[in-house]
Image: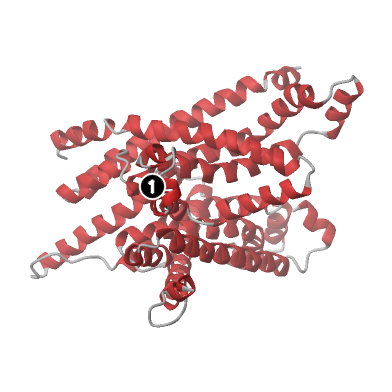
Amino acid sequence: MDFPFLSQTMITLLKAVPMTLALFSASIFFGGVLALLIVWMRVGGNPVLSAIAKGYVFVFRGSPLLIQMFLVFYGLAQFGFIRYSFLWPFLREPFVCAVLSLALCTAGYTAEIFRGGIRAVSPREIEAARSIGMSGFLLVRRILAPIAFRHALPAYSTEIVLMMKSTALASLVTVWEVTGVAQRLISQTYRTMEIFLCAAIIYLVLNFVILQGMALLEYSLSRHRRAVLRR
Amino acid sequence: MATLELIGFGSTGWGALLLLGALTTLAVTATALAIGAVLGTIIAGAKLSGNWLLVAIGNLYTTVFRGIPELLIIYLIYFGGSSAVTAIGVAMGYEGFLGLPSFAAGALAVGIISGAYQAEVFRGAYLAISKGELEAASAIGMHGRLRFRRIIMPQVWRFAIPGLGNVWQLSLKDSALVSVTGLAELMRTSQVAAGSTRQYFLFFIVGGALYLILTSLSDRVFNGAERRANRSMPAAAMGQA
């Protein structure tokens, strides 16, 4: 074991962690917002909007993220109207392209997870809310969303871990996050095993922290259930 | 018109190469799934064995290979494997760099990943077998291998099909990452076609559409397999399972 080399590698890779985290949090945030919009279209009752949402989910879950990312990164630049539009200063940045494609992709998966959560809300609870006069947004905010979110949480935490792993693909559109830096180090030194070990530890720690955080969130959101169980 | 020519089957068209790429993608994924089935069975067996050391090894395997990016695992197998092959070559008197074939490296890497997911699928399927049936098999004197072959295997298979369908879809999409090793599967072919014609948007859309065809077709195959595997089950029991 060559400890100086390992610690050197670890330090180099740790410097790339903020980039991975930035990709991760930005795509989870935007993907979540987009997923809410898609779920709303899907369950809103309008057949046209529902079909669009279905098509969206089919396309973004059915094709690999890498091809979506290349489509955004290389494909959009091909069009003059995009290159001369106000969007170009943003779309020129690899980071923005990576976040855009990660968010578009995760939105498809997350929308299905949220829909599953909504379906798990008992109709009786909605009826009860209606019967005491709640309607529309108030019902969603007070009854539907909290219960649905709690039901969706286990599947959502899996999706979040998958997302953390997916940020690795950003290295292929020249964003220097952990996997990209690891690959550069491997091709410079050919010491695959040691570098892999360091990068693997980083990802495992990140995912462990995420899963613990999600478990904590789940625990705190089901406080009322524990009270029932204790009795 | 020019667009049709580019993706068509003429002398300037990329159609035939793209279809070949799609077939390579299917071949990589199928090989990977087979490798993963073997690994998954071993790991599931280890996790169910009750021996603390085997359980720990099984848990380590599934945690590591489900917890780190697929791309990193592909780099590990491709570069690490090539170094190993080169070292063997040097030991046998061959000087210079030897690369691991990209198909083998890619299928192995995706197979190792899918093995971690399949282990969980098989474990869940085994746990879904009702205890009564296992006891009944032992009670009429079936032992070890016979019980495994007659009672456990057929049921694990049936319970595992939906999960295996998910793993197949996952591996199909992971196989796109094998393009980094230079293997001319669908992703790589789209990339090469896009680069050499400068029609990025067109070829990534076409490549994506081919992936959509592959995923939706395989969805149908797995649904059919599920129906077939459950054909002896009464409809009511299927609802429970």
Horizontal and vertical percent position of residue A71: 44, 53
B132 to A224, vertically: above or below: below
Q: Residue at x 24, y 55 (%)?
A: B80
Horizontal and vertical percent position of residue A125: 84, 28
Q: Residue at x 63, y 41 (%)?
A: A111
Quadrant, the C terminus of chain A: top right
Q: Is residue B19 left or right of residue A193?
A: right
Amino acid type, residue under disc 1 in the picture: Leu
Q: Residue at x 32, y 58 (%)?
A: B180
Q: Nearer the viewer, residue A71 or A82?
A: A82
Q: Which of the chains bears the disc numbered 1?
A: A
How many numbered dots are placed on residues in this image? 1
Q: Which residue is mark 1?
A: A169
Q: Nearer the viewer, residue B160 or A180?
A: A180
Q: Residue at x 48, y 36 (%)?
A: A27
Say whether residue B37 is visible: no
Horizontal and vertical percent position of residue A184: 22, 46
Identify the element where label 1 is drawn: helix
A12 to B224, vertically: above or below: above
Q: Nearer the viewer, residue A77 or B37?
A: A77
Say whether residue A98 is visible: yes
> On the image, which quarter does residue B78 sit in?
bottom left
Q: Is residue B150 left or right of residue B196?
A: right
Please rate how many residues cluster around mark 1, counting C-alpha atoms within 10 Å: few if below 14, some from 14 to 19, many from 20: many
Horizontal and vertical percent position of residue A221: 65, 22
